[in-house]
Image (cartoon, rainbow, N blue to C red):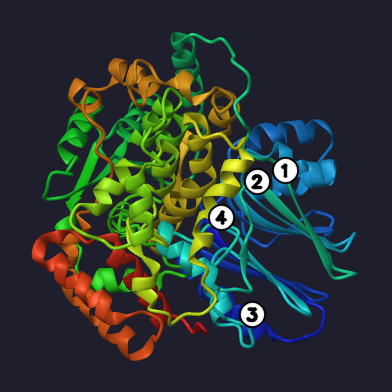
Amino acid sequence: MCGIFAVFQQQPKWSKMHLERALDVLTSRGPDGKGIFMDRGVFLGHRRLAIIDLVSGDQPMISWDGKIAIVFNGEIYNYQDLKTRLLQHGHKFSTNSDTEVILELYRKYGIDFLEHLEGMFAFVLLDQENRKLICARDRIGIKPLYWSVANNHYIFSSTLAPFFVLPGIDLSLDPSALRDFLAYDYVPAPSSLVKEVQKLLPGQFLEVDLVNFRHKTNFFWRLPSAASKLKLSFSDISEMTEFYLDKAVKRQMVSDVPLGVFLSGGIDSSLLVAYMARHSQKPIKTFTIGFQNGSDESPFARLVSKRYATDHTEFEASEITNELLYDTLLSMDEPLSDPAIIPTRMISSLARKQVKVVLAGEGGDEMFVGYPRYLEALKRAHHSCKFSKTALKRFLDIISIKFKGSARIYRHLLTTDALLMNQRIRYSPHTFLGAKFDDLFAGKLNGINSDGVYDHWNQNLKRFGGVLNCDTLRRMDFVTKLTDNHLFKCDRASMMESLEVRVPFLDEFLLDNLLPIDASELVKEGDLKSVLKDLASKYLPLEVWNRPKHGFNVPLSEYMANQWEDTVENLLDWGEGNLDIFDFGYLRNLQMKNKNGKHISRALWSPVCFIAWVKAHPIRI
């Protein structure tokens, strides 16, 4: 895993010193080495975390004939097969790295080479002969890539961080992106909180004509809709899953450095341990985090560790100090208000002392129907709420005044579709659906259309057919919360500690063979994760898989009221003196309610994360 940074300047604006300084802010993503390439206005910069081909895999990598150059972040899991095919066609190689395979694959297939890559990746490739840059991001967006274009330059980077240190960059805040961040906990792609900077979408590539200074974007892969019924039995699906999950785990264990796994104690990560044990001659190194409350799953992780005789390490989340919290929040290139990023960083730090690569269970819930809301969507296919247009709902819409129990009553009157649409929204334009934008901003930020918060939902619903059902909801989660929250969290937390995280549940073996199956076919007798539970019954202790879903839940309200109180109060103090967009009386009232045990949680946490981000970066509001 690495950090990449690339610039094309039509006219000289930044010196080599400026560009190297911007590259160096990515050091934690690649502490093992640094390389640069400069030619005719193009700068390619790379910070390396050495995983494959430790000796000859340095970057930027130049093809044997000097015509192609690349900076690459990620791992190509099928690179050995691709290399064998390319050798048969006479291609030359001087390294054992997957990076060189990308260069030769491009030489053979041109832009169609992207369809052959399987893995997690973001890269910038320079075609010297045809004077163009090609940038791409993997199918699911496991690895990030930001980009920006102005009058005489293009910039590409693994994170927003380099944009903050290049002089002359427009760092104006995007109000709509802020609205969506507060509503959803993350900034939905392709937007970023910096108006002039975008994210490349999963499965998207961008081609820049360096001669004419213009670009075009397209997709080499898009998440498919469900195919027509494949007429597979449940046992067929279970056998298929086992076959492809085993293949995915095996090839993602390929590494020239020590490797382990994040073991939460849930079904997903526990199954990874079971399959990893098949392919390892040594005890698997497992890492677990525990909480001193009802969400602690570390006892189940110990059961799995005992079953497979792993080399097990765990730590208690109560060790998360204000200092660590504060450093993490201010180190984020873009804010994320999922508090799980803090313990994820901690477990990454713990793992990094022993290994350089870990496997993790991200994607299991989306792939195998693991969220309760999917079952709600299944029920929606059979009935919808009959109360959505009653006189009581119309009355509440008109008065728009909260009273005790009003939110609960209002939600009861909504259709299933409306409930699902608003289920994950933290801030809303509506009085009865969570915290309200008007209360937070108090008219202090122009440019926010709070009704636009639903655009994110509606665009993706339309993309998958416009009809809300279990399968549509599952696919919408793939292209939104999975990429922009869960995978973002995993990338940033692990890269702060220079650790590579791989996610076998999102391997192409599974994407290609299981995504075409409608989500309803993966649910047996209304049981979430039916397929994985079927496999777990063969390989895991009963206590691990035969229990309600827990999830990786940080006791956020309790932490903000107690061990994280100093950080919350300090950021509110700074924000009140320096950030004139929020109503800080409203935010302090939320913290007071939280300290009184009312569990305010995300309505306060999201603004606090944004305040920390503004404090750390030169954003223009």
Label 4 sits on what residue type? Asp
Which label's residue is closer to the chain start, 1 or 4? 1
Mark drawn on residue 455? 4
- Image-quadrant location for residue 281: top left
Q: Earlier in the sequence, mark 1 or mark 3?
A: 3
Q: Residue 466 or 171: which is nearer the viewer?
A: 466
The answer for how far apart the CA atoms under marks 2 and 4 are is 21 Å
Q: Amino acid at mark 2?
A: Gly
Badge 3 is on which residue? 19
Q: Are marks 1 and 2 in contact (CB under 8 Å)?
A: yes
Query: Which numbered circle lies on residue 220?
Result: 1
Q: Nearer the viewer, mark 3 or mark 2?
A: 2
Location of mark 2 (residue): 203
CA distance separating discs 3 and 4? 37 Å
Q: Can residue 604 be seen at all in this image of the molecule?
A: yes
Across and down, in percent, residue 129 comes to 90, 60
